Amino acid sequence: MRIIYLLIFLCCLSCNNERVLLLPEIENAKTTEVLDVSPGYIFYDETQPDSTLLNRKNLIITTNWLVNVDKRLTLKQAIPHIKFLQDKKRNAEMHKNENAKNYFTCNDTSIKNLGFLEFTDVYYEMVNSHKDSINLHALQLKPIDDAVISELPIPATYLVIDNGNKADFENLIIPILQYQKAIYTAMPDKNIITSGFSLNIYFDGHLSFQDYISMKSTLEKLNTEKLKITSNEFIY
């Protein structure tokens, strides 16, 4: 029945002007059911100037939004549309529902059904890596509201993810966790309190949306009290 439900969902998309939307795949999604929803679609369409087509006519501002993004799109293609939708909802003045959330719709292969990845509080920023180096941009970042606060002068760290290191993504996190553990070991004084690290992530705009969702799913499981993934995400 779950397989049939997923196929029906995809067929409904393809029946809309014969368009097909390939959902990104994840495993063991934390969220597998969302109620009171309305859908939006970002199609892969080679006939368009940027190969994307946004359909938002079914989105209702007071509901939870299910944003369906074709996994073949790159971040440079998809993120501007996603940011546009976020701004529309955040800046709404009439009939606003503060409890309404935003989710990416995914194909959860572990249950052969739909899974959902929340992105309500994510703020996307496009970074011009040709104008400003990523290293300089990271150093100039101002503290944000959800950054981890520490009584020790431990700066926020950052990762740069591209097509060259995406396959080793989880291993890139390990040195950060080891560094954190080393500080606790070196400073056993109980009067010294550290709250952990905040992590800013820079994603190469040429990464596919499938790549992005795979890494976001991993980050969702790593986001702990000791390693806070900041809500600001940077696309370069």
Image (cartoon, rainbow, N blue to C red):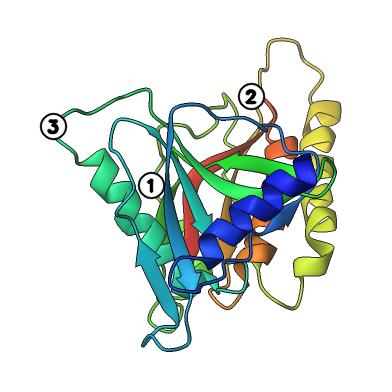
Provide the residue designation for mark 2.
Answer: 195
- Mark 1 is on which residue type? Lys
Assess disc 2: are there few (<14), some (14-19) or many (≥20) residues with their C-alpha within 10 Å of its C-alpha.
some
Q: Is residue 20 left or right of residue 36?
A: right
* Residue 209 image-quadrant placement: bottom right
In the picture, the disc for residue 142 is 1
Distance CA(mark 1)–CA(mark 2): 18 Å
Q: Nearer the viewer, mark 3 or mark 1?
A: 3
Residue 215 visible, this angle: no
Q: Secondary structure at mark 1?
A: loop
Determine the CA span between mark 3 and mark 2.
39 Å
Drawn side of residue 107 relative to residue 14, left or right: right
Residue 151 rendering spot, x and y as whole percentages: 57, 23
Q: Which residue is mark 3?
A: 94
The image position of residue 201, as x and y in percent, is 58, 56
**Kind of element beneath mark 3:** loop
Residue lying furthest left: 94
Say what amino acid the circle numbered 2 marks.
Ser
Residue 29 visible? The answer is yes
State how far apart marks 3 and 1 are (Cα). 32 Å
Q: Position of residue 42 (x, y in %)?
A: 45, 64
Q: Amino acid at mark 3?
A: Met
User: How many numbered discs?
Assistant: 3
For the residues labelled 3 and 2, say whether their Cβ atoms are less than 8 Å apart.
Answer: no
Q: Residue 191 at x, y = what percent?
A: 68, 10
